[in-house]
Amino acid sequence: MLKIIPILLLSLACSESENPKPNIPQPEPIGPKEYSFSTTPSWADEFDYEGLPDVKKWSYDAGSQNNGWGNNELQYYTEANLENARVENGLLTITAKRENFEGLTYTSARLVSKGKGDFLYGRFEVRAKVPPGKGTWAAAWMLPTDWAYGGWPASGEIDILEHVGYDQDVVHISMHTEAYNHSIGTQKTSTKKIQNATTEFHVYRVDWTPDYIKGFVDNVEIFHLANEAKGYTVWPFDKRFHWLLNLAVGGDWGGQQGVDEDAFPAKMEVDYVRVYDLQ
């Protein structure tokens, strides 16, 4: 037996060296998919004309809190009124004025692209300058066109830019859904303190894809919301949305520190609005 054991061991060793085990590489973990966008806008308003906003691209949400919508704001949104929405010198200017109208003491405008610019995914960009003064509440944002999952907030909201005048130079990018919204304190939001938001133009952007929404200020990412694949209550962003541009007065947020009457007329200026297709 003592002479046989070395032979067996030698035989096993030779067998293993003649038939080595294959080297199978381990698969690398899959990272989040990155998307690209077209370099030329598929829909845009450069505001390179004069007069009222282009009727082929914009309509109006006219009315007030008295019509059953809003956030306890103080303005009446007028329709096709040059005093509240005017294009000249390459800019759209939305003006909130202190004046008596329809039982309220302020007027302003809220432009919407619904039915004229409705989008599912893409890069959404606005270059804008917001007004100072307590009581102003400027926004460039998006709402669902079809409300497929029900009324707000079930069908979602995409806020590309929000600014309230009492919080000077602080801008916000937010998303609202049934599970994540400000009424229950769970909204997904990011804020950034920037220089000269009320005296200089800045570029606000959202990249909206099937897997994530990212928000940028002057091309710096400040916001990221991933699709958790848990249904519409957390991700209703698989349906069409449209643009809104408006300047509100007061309200649950804009009026938290009161309204400075001397801040009016207040102006939100927009250099351009652009949409780039998802590729």
Image (cartoon, rainbow, N blue to C red):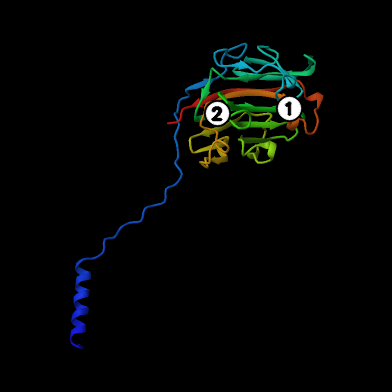
Q: Position of residue 45 (x, y in %)?
A: 55, 19
The quarter of the picture where residue 83 lies is top right
Q: Callout 1: 10 Å neighbours few (<14), some, many (20+)?
A: many
Relative placement, left or right, of 154 versus 31 is right
Q: Callout 2: 10 Å neighbours few (<14), some, many (20+)?
A: many
Per the model, the C-alpha gap separating discs 1 and 2 is 22 Å
The reply to whether discs 1 and 2 touch (Cβ–Cβ < 8 Å) is no
The quarter of the picture where residue 63 lies is top right
User: What number of labels is visible?
Assistant: 2
Q: Nearer the viewer, residue 35 or 21?
A: 21
Residue type (three-letter) at the residue carrying disc 1: Thr
Residue type (three-letter) at the residue carrying disc 2: Glu
Q: Quadrant of the N terminus?
A: bottom left
- Which residue is tagged 1? 136
- Which residue is tagged 2? 125
Q: Position of residue 276 (x, y in %)?
A: 48, 27
Relative placement, left or right, of 80 versus 257 is left
**Which of the marked residues, 1 or 2, is nearer the chain's N terminus?**
2
Q: Quadrant of the C terminus?
A: top left
Image height of 173 relative to 148, above or below: below
The quarter of the picture where residue 266 lies is top right
Q: Position of residue 61 (x, y in %)?
A: 65, 18
Q: Nearer the viewer, residue 109 or 87?
A: 109
Secondary structure at numbered mark 1:
strand
